[in-house]
Amino acid sequence: MEQALLTVNDLSVEFSTPMGIVKAVTHVSWSLHRGEILAIVGESGSGKSVTALSILQLIATPPGRIVSGDVLFDGQNLLALSEDSIRTIRGRKISMVFQEPMTSLNPVLSIGRQMTEQMKLHLGLTTQKAKQRAVDLMKRVGISEPEDRLRQYPHHFSGGMRQRVMIAMALSCDPEIIIADEPTTALDVTIQAQILQLMQGLCREMNVGLILITHNLGVVARYADRVSVMYAGRIVETADANLIYEQPRHPYTYGLLQSVPRLDSPRGSTLTPIPGNPPDLVDLPSGCAFHPRCHIGQSNCQTTVPELISSEQAHSVACLYSNQLLAENTI
Amino acid sequence: MTEPSQSNTTDSIALIEVNNLKKTFPGTRGVFSRTRTGDVKAVQNVSFDVNKGETLGLVGESGCGKSTIGRCILKLEEPTDGTVDFDGKRLNTINGMDLRNYRRRAQAVFQDPFSSLNPRMTVEQIVGEPLLVHGLEKDTKERRVSASKILDLCGLPRRILDSYPHEMSGGQRQRTGIARALILNPDFILCDEAVSALDVSIQAQIIKLLEDLRNEFGLTYLFIAHDLSVVRHISHRVAVMYLGRIVELAEANELFENPKHPYTQALLSAVPIPDPAVERTRRLEIIEGEIPSPVNPPSGCVFHPRCPLADDTCRVGVPDTIDLGTGHLVACKKVDQLELH
């Protein structure tokens, strides 16, 4: 197997809050390859965004604190870099697309000014050259009349168009990795399809690694190559997208798949919700954090934290009884 | 698969009848001068019925007018034109005791369970308030008893009676909103994006609760949502809206298995199914462009600028709504080509 483009090793992140220490991310490890789309799935508060933000040192410290771990990219540990050094990577080799395109664009600067800024900074282009490149990029992401659009301001753009601008900006310095944090959650479904189709195409074409953070299991099924599922700050399962849907090994993954309504299932088809609520990150359950909601858990789940164990076909799962789940579902 | 509510829908007595409903909002520009610009045509000539015991799903993308229809039905907005009837009574002119009675029989559950609950009231006060407003139970102790009974039904522990909204999880808040809607024993509940803000595992719990309550009390829902998979799961019939108009309406399975309108087809194709094996076999039709502004909607069929089938005839004259049989309604001039498409 070729060498990983980006490797996250044993990452733990905490936040101090008035209520106590929030363990947002605990011992998270994964790797991303060139041209690959890795989806990180989980519900709100599962730690998926914090993981992504930590990679580029975008966690505010304090209250945040990286407790342990390293992020290897290009032979260096991104977490150990100085602010000056990480700035040569952030937006240049690793770029980000955020959920809400209105808050990530500056409302008082023209789109052209915002698009050219980082090209001038990172690539040393002249204003003229940067503008030309911005026009090309806008065409590439499907924005018509780019010369006119560059003179406009964010409020002139619709949500979908703003997200295209964000993608164009993310691509502007030929990055090796794009981190997309819920890039289409604020968009309508037909626009979501346009944007994700575009991102998928661009990644394949330019051999860029894409980290797709989402809570939408349908989006993952359609676009991702590999999936990591997070629960309460930990990775509970990682596998090929096909495998994880066909043969989920963690009861949480299984529960999620059983609880989403599907467009192709008729009314009244069974929906099996996961009982209970996601845990309080200040006061996590002992042992496996999922045990209070788990249907196969046993008493030792309350005391033992299951490790993420890799089995055949690079399918890793953090559950003491994952074989039991497998047996149950093959009957 | 059979369910108890099915029998309620077959006798098809309309509880709500919407006829040629129109709602325009005046558009203005500037903070002080308030220059009139074009009107926002939020809803244009919409007609449909909701039968007793039925759940009608209303889907469409943001700005298509689905929430405005809901608000007109609840009399939170006055229609610009057209009529809404509830159980034979015309809502446009309803007043006095009839209006009071209507306010009891029609309730709503909204999307954001945080902003729709008063942060300074306890759950007991929130859930019991409708009883007080309608003068049904003046005694505080009895109201507490009624509130705790409803909480039981909605799967909330009684100890939550004295909690405030900020002390609860999103799912519990949504259950509280449902309990408040239910306490007056209504006939009709408008669910406007009622499960959209919830995490997947909690969303399934609330969908199940809504289904159970419907079956137990014979409730009628107008289920407004943008998540088509959820709508399919819960609705008996589904109406698809685009830019203020209903473009297609059919029995749920028929609509999802056999969509006719090019917009419905594009919309369904855009929704990914959480199963890579199924996704690989699907033919995706991604439509280009974006929804035009409702201030200045396209002439003729509002969908024509994005429609793969559109020709010159679509640019003039709004398409009639045609019944393809068994109540499958579609508003498209190319209806003869739809089968082939």
Image: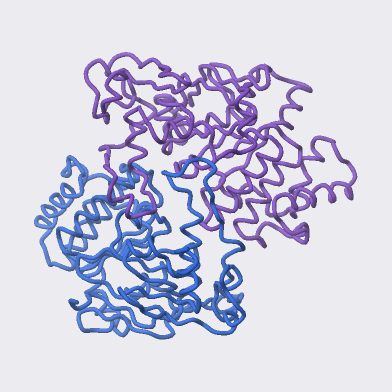
Q: Is residue B175 left or right of residue A74?
A: right
Shown in blue, the chain is A
x and y, in percent, of residue B340 in the image: 26, 26
For chain B, what colour was chosen? purple
Query: Vertical placement of A109 versus B38: above or below?
Result: below
x and y, in percent, of residue A311 in the image: 36, 78
x and y, in percent, of residue B161 in the image: 77, 57
Residue A31 sits in quarter: bottom left
Residue A126 visible: yes
Residue A47 visible: no
Q: Is residue B161 left or right of residue B62?
A: right
Q: A148 or A230: which is nearer to us?
A: A230
The quarter of the image holding the N terminus of chain A is bottom left
* Residue at x 43%, y 17% (from the top left corner): B323
Query: Vertical placement of A103 versus B338: above or below?
Result: below
Query: Vertical placement of B320 versus A55: above or below?
Result: above
Q: B314 or A319: which is nearer to us?
A: A319
Residue A221 sits in quarter: bottom left
